[in-house]
Amino acid sequence: MSATDQGPARSGSSARGGQGSARGVVSTIVHQPYIWAIVTLLLLLVINLVKDPGYLGVSVNGTTGNLSGNPIDILRASAPIMMIAVGMTLVIATRGIDLSVGSVMAVSGAVSMEFMSNQSGGDAGSAIVAALLALAVSAFLGTVNGVLVSIVGLQPFITTLITMLAGRGLAKVITSGQNTSATNEPFRWLANGTVFGFPVVFIIAGVIVAIVAFLVRRTALGLMIESIGINPRAARMAGIRPIGILIAVYIVSAVLAGVAGIFSTASVMTVEVAKTGLNAEMDAILAVVIGGTSLAGGKFSLTGSVIGALLIATLDKTIVFLSIPSSATPAFKAVVIVIICLLQSQRVRALFARRKSRTTPTASVPTRKETVSA
């Protein structure tokens, strides 16, 4: 074979290789556990665009220079959900659950608002101290959860259910059962301020998610969390100490819930003990499940949880935008989430794969005689 004959063959093989690599990339994307969450998120945006073509429009305030529009509102609303979803992801990866995140949000908001309401000046120093106190109390509640689960051996569901009830009561004790308000512009800026036109609250949430992702993916911590969720006994035999990791995971979940509580109360500078963080644990669990993390523990996806948080925030805004009655809101949300979970189910995927294999014609295989004659 001459050199000129080899050229087309090589170019053809390289083209086939390029097609194969492209197909490989597409296949990898399609098989991501959170792909249907992305599809649903885009579908919700399309529905909103059909009703209002300018739904995704973003404008710039000529006076302040801040960006405004529905996408900015979605980013701002997703930040608290993102915080509790990331913490919940780590807990669920260890075969646990944290039902106390909503109550921890209320405690965090109660501590910060009560402290600032008793301060005469609304300076940045008071805001920093209030935030640190709120996070310290949240970390203490997370430590209680971690100790009861890892050392005492209580079930995570029972442990965090107790903390959920006790935390809401603690918030009422801190505020004497009253809604507490405060005035502090630096603290309010955390939820309502902007940097280069983007919400500060979303930027802070993004930085925190990046730090957590770096710790669990660039160190052995993520593998140890997954090993505990897959097989705690085997992890213990491999030299991993589940006690310390479990305590750390519940502390992280509580601290991130405390951050979400600060975000929620800073937006209105008021803590409503009965409403702050209400049903937040459900949104967190749903965001984690939508993102593809299994409730059975093991492998987890922080990226999927972030996408799930964005989806829930978009869904909440879509419900309001479509003027769906408040009484039907839980049912509407449940239908969307059930559809996503079904699409992510392994059995449903296997069913689609079997049907596809039946409908796809199989290429004829040449016989030995045909091969020789060719």
Image: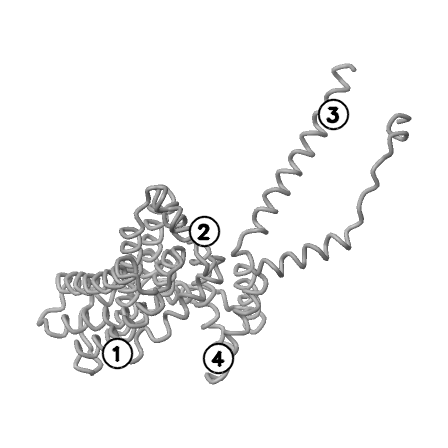
Q: Which residue is mark 4?
A: 329
Q: Residue at x 50, y 68 (%)?
A: 55
How far is disc 4 from disc 2 in space, using C-alphas? 32 Å
Residue 9: image tag: 3
Counting residues from the start of the chain, the first of labels 1 and 4 encountered is 1
Circle nearer the N terminus (3, 4): 3
* N-terminal-most mark, 1 or 2: 1
**In this view, the mark in front (2 or 3):** 2
Instruction: State whether residue 71 is above or below residue 369.
Output: below
Q: Which residue is mark 1?
A: 273
Q: Is residue 308 left or right of residue 128?
A: right
Q: Name the residue nearer the viewer: 190 or 55.
A: 190
* Residue type marked 1: Val
State how far apart marks 1 and 2 are (Cα): 35 Å
As measured in the structure, the alpha-carbon distance from the residue carrying label 3 to the one carrying label 1 is 72 Å
Mark-to-mark CA distance, 2 and 3: 43 Å
Number of the front mark, 3 or 4: 4
Q: Amino acid at mark 2?
A: Lys
Do the numbered discs 3 and 4 sit on residues whose CB atoms are within 8 Å? no
Q: Position of residue 50 (x, y in %)?
A: 58, 71
Q: Is the residue 212 above or below the residue 267 in the image?
A: above
